[in-house]
């Protein structure tokens, strides 16, 4: 390496330093706020953030499941607080959400597994190794049968970072990554060596996580799944930092949700940072625009915690009848349901169901379409 292993490959300017200090103050404030919450409320916030991250990260890579459907899959795979094997529930899930979305469901389940691993084992995963990264990649793709020949292994044929315009179907090459073979292997070894020496030493771990994420994406070491894994590794880096406020808040924010909302900007910045090419010397990247992007994304994601808090409080205020109606919707996340269907399902008086639907709609749990007898309701995440 041509630079200090305990340093970034670039020098942040004063403006960037100032914004980082502002974010650090926000993190302290938000951590202190969350610290005063009840354990069950913290758990609810973490669940909401997890679902949102899984849904967003997979949709960035063209999966199609909504957050409501992701939450339903997560619930189906969780029994008494423990994860149930996907293969045991696969047919049930596919029958519920339709088999034509099997690939998206497999992506969601894989993404869920690696995020749960990262959230629960981040301390044990330090120092980070290439074996760990390959293992996470294996888990990410293990339910996708077509990936059996390459999951957990570095690529053997060239690949590209592609962005797709969903309106037009147009694809654009964002970055030409490292070529397979010795260049990819050397670049990954250098990256992991640099990361382990830097993440717990450098003053601003968000900048380290940003450089780590981008250099991983620029290498694009695997045949498939690099984007999802790269964003998960960004979260891992934040968790493994020595900043207790940052590491305490990461599991309660949906960073990927805000990346998804800025998707076109995200891909544009990835191209700008690299000028579309992998470089062996990281000093050749212009990483500052991506640092600003991630700082803004984290700042925005902190505001979601209040939304989750309010949703939890509204949930606790629901009557037993309203909870029964809400659970009926959660069993069929893909459906728009009419009052008469609910009457058959939960055996409550029509007036009680209508009152519950009104309360659930006002509190943001359901959305209503149509009027009168033709009205239908559907879950809102």
Image: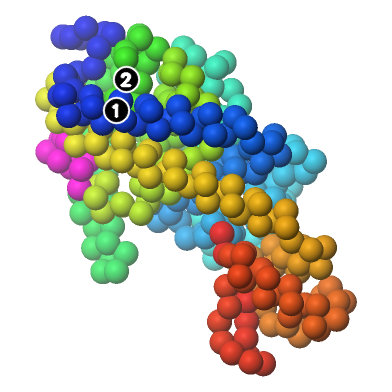
Work out whether residue 341 or residue 92 is closer to the camera in this orientation and state it: 341
Which residue is at 34% across, 31% downward? 23
Which residue is at 61% across, 70% downward? 362
Q: Is residue 22 magenta?
A: no
Work out whether residue 276 can be spotted: no
Question: Which residue position holds label 2?
Answer: 204
The answer to whether marks 1 and 2 mark residues whose Cβ atoms lie closer than 8 Å is yes
Work out whether residue 28 can be spotted: yes
Q: Position of residue 119 (x, y in %)?
A: 56, 29
Callout 2 secondary element: loop
Q: Is residue 270 magenta?
A: yes
- Measured in 3D between alpha carbons, the distance from the residue under mark 1 to the one under mark 2, in whole angstroms, is 8 Å
Q: Quadrant of the C terminus?
A: bottom right
Work out whether residue 68 or residue 88 is closer to the camera in this orientation and state it: 68
Q: Position of residue 365 (x, y in %)?
A: 62, 64
Callout 1 secondary element: helix
Q: Quadrant of the N terminus?
A: top left
Q: Which residues are magenta?
A: 268-278
Q: Is residue 338 above or below residue 177?
A: below
Q: Is residue 236 above or below residue 370?
A: above
Q: Residue 20: give its label.
A: 1
Q: Quadrant of residue 84?
A: top right
Q: Position of residue 276 (x, y in %)?
A: 15, 40
Q: Is residue 326 above or below residue 174?
A: below
Q: Residue 282: give its label.
A: none
């Amino acid at each position: 390496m041509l630079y200090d292993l305990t340093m970034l490959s670039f020098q942040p300017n004063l403006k960037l330093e100032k914004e980082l200090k502002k974010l650090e103050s926000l993190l302290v404030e938000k951590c202190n706020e969350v610290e005063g919450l009840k354990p069950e409320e913290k758990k609810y916030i973490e669940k909401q953030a997890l679902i949102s991250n899984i849904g967003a990260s997979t949709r960035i890579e063209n999966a199609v499941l909504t957050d409501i459907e992701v939450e339903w899959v997560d619930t189906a795979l969780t029994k008494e607080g423990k994860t149930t094997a996907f293969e045991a529930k696969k047919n049930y899930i596919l029958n519920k959400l339709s088999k034509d979305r099997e690939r998206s469901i497999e992506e969601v389940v894989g993404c869920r597994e690696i995020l749960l691993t990262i959230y629960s084992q981040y301390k044990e995963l330090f120092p980070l190794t290439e074996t760990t990264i390959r293992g996470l990649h294996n888990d990410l793709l293990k339910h996708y049968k077509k990936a059996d020949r390459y999951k957990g292994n570095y690529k053997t044929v060239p690949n590209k970072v592609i962005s797709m315009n969903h309106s037009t179907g147009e694809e654009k090459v964002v970055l030409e990554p490292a070529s397979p073979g010795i260049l990819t292997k050397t670049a990954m070894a250098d990256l992991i060596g640099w990361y382990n020496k830097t993440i717990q030493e450098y003053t601003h771990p968000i900048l380290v996580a940003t450089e780590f994420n981008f250099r991983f994406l620029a290498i694009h070491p695997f045949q498939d799944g690099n984007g999802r894994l790269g964003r998960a590794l960004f979260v891992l880096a934040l968790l493994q930092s020595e900043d207790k406020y940052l590491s305490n808040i990461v599991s309660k924010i949906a960073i990927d949700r805000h990346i998804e909302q800025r998707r076109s900007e995200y891909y544009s910045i990835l191209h700008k940072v690299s000028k579309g090419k992998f470089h062996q010397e990281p000093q050749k990247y212009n990483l500052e625009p991506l640092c600003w992007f991630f700082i803004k994304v984290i700042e925005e994601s902190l505001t979601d915690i209040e939304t989750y808090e309010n949703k939890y409080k509204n949930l606790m205020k629901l009557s037993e009848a309203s909870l029964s109606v809400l659970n009926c919707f959660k069993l069929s996340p893909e459906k728009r349901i009419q009052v008469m269907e609910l009457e058959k399902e939960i055996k409550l008086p029509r007036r009680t169901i209508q009152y519950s639907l009104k309360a659930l709609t006002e509190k943001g749990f359901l959305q209503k379409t149509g009027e009168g007898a033709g009205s239908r309701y559907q879950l809102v995440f």
